[in-house]
Amino acid sequence: MTLTGSIVALLFFLLQGGTTWPWLSLPSFGLLVLCLVLVAAFLFQEQRAPDPILPLSLFTNRIIAVSSLGGIVLGILMFGITSYVPLFVQGVQGGTASSAGITLGPLLLAWPIAATISGRVVIRYGYRFTSVLGMAFAAIGTGMITLFTAGTSLPFIVIAMFIIGTGLGLSSTAFILSVQNAVPWKLRGVATATTQFVRTIGGMIGVALMGTILNAQMASRFPAIFARSPAATATLPKNVSQSNVLLTPDVRNTLPIDFLHQLQSAFSQSLFWVYALVFAFAAIGVALMFLFPGGRADKYSYKSTQAASNDTPGESREVEAEHSLTNTLS
């Protein structure tokens, strides 16, 4: 309850602040304080629980800690891209909801292909190399989406999404493998679930933050455009808000061309700041991945580290650890 409550309070803080009430207001301050108090209560409870939901001791392991940070970034990128790139195609380029959804196809195609390859790359080159490579691909792809304009061609969008999908696929497999092989068998379930959990939390918070930025940017641009075009504004249905005009085809098709282009330009400029934030997180992700230990992955498996503490001969340790990592992939 404490963890769920803290997340809900944070989401309300991000989504309602600056719109329903000012950022510097009692409701915003109250939600932020409530979030911090509930997080502290959750950590206090987990430290003393005999069977904790989220074993905090896992995060003392460097590999798990870095994988969790990477999972948060991965969640932000995944949820951010899948939420806001279709908005660009539909709102700025005038596509339908179906065509906007199709733009996710290259990402969804590249992800499993890269994830399959990633396992072998991890065995050969290690966690650091694979995760840095994956985040670098993601950074390149998200850098490309910051260049999106109303005139951006479909091939450019497809290539950007394919590159992002490749990066996410490489990284996600590296994170899962690193966590699963850093703990004994009895903890693999909870360790894997923890990785998935932090990815989801990162995505939720990231999307809420991006929504806050988009709303703020649109609020600073759209009202002036509507005010300059009272005739066009008067023809809009009462049940369609300013922010949804471009996303409602029946309404969008009735707008005067000049008015439509102004709205599309303003929407594109607003989305740019969302994409810039996504790119910033991808760049941070690249830097974080260098915190992974270098070298072959089998050196850092649980069996290998336990054998090292028991002075097991080095060659037999490596063979056993590599077999363990290979079994995880199969």
Image (cartoon, rainbow, N blue to C red):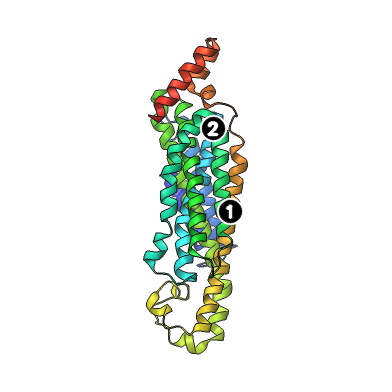
Disc 1 secondary structure class: helix
Quarter the C terminus occupies: top left
26 vs 305, nearest the viewer: 305
**For the residues marked 2 and 1, what is the alpha-carbon distance in whole angstroms?**
22 Å
Amino acid at pointer 1: Phe
Hey, which residue is sitting farthest front in the picture? 155
Which residue corresponds to mark 1?
279
In what element is the residue under mark 2? helix
- Foreground: 193 or 145? 145
**Vertical order, 70 against 315 (above or below):** below
Q: Residue at x 53, y 78 (%)?
A: 261
| Mark carried by residue 322 | none
Q: Judge whether 165 appears above or below 49 on screen.
A: below
> Residue 303 at what x, y percent from top left?
47, 19
Residue 9 shows in the view: no
Residue 184, horizontal then vertical, whole percent: 43, 23
When the figure is inspected, residue 192 is found, relative to residue 312, above or below; the finding is: below
Q: Name the residue rendered at 57%, 63% in the picture.
A: 272
